[in-house]
Image (tube, rainbow, N blue to C red):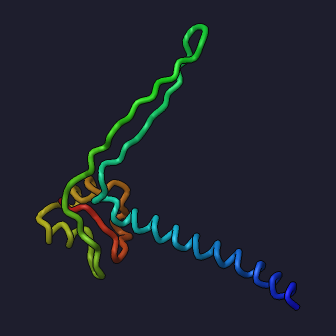
Amino acid sequence: MQTRHRNWLARVAAPLAFLVLATLGVVAVRTALDEGDSAAPATVTVTTTAETSPAKQTTTGTTTAKPRGGKLYRVQSGDTLESIADDHGTTVEALLELNAGIDPVALRIGQRIRVG
């Protein structure tokens, strides 16, 4: 009986622990993405390899990206880019420029967009 109980516990506990850790990871990533606009500067390391005559030469450089400043707005029910632009004294074109990749006809409630 004791062995049967341990086998059941092992079969259930491992997947359950995995799901809990995966869920925590997803929550952490989503939180970072939602608040990524106010994060510290990102450091990117780039490694390039250039072939020279007899050997290869590798160089490594570090670039610090400046955080994009500006004001953020959280989309609410009924908002359109036009209404948001009017409320913030700007144009739809300016909002599209500030928010590359945003779909102007598919705004999501709670989505953060840059307005200035």
In front of the other: 69 or 92: 69
On screen, residue 33 above or below 57: below
Seen in the picture, residue 79 relative to 50 is either above or below; the reply is below
Q: Nearer the viewer, residue 10 or 42?
A: 10
Residue at left 26%, top 55%? 98
Residue found at x 70% / y 75%: 15
x, y (%) of residue 76? 28, 79
The answer to whether 90 appears left or right of 30 in the picture is left
Image location (x, y in percent) of residue 77: 30, 82
The image quadrant that residue 112 belongs to is bottom left
Is 65 placed above or below 90 here?
above
Left or right relative to 45: residue 21? right
* The C terminus, quarter of image: bottom left
For the N terminus, the image quarter is bottom right
Query: For the view shown, which residue lies furthest in the bottom direction?
Result: 1
- Judged from this view, the residue extending furthest toward the front is 2
Residue 48 image point, x, y percent: 50, 27
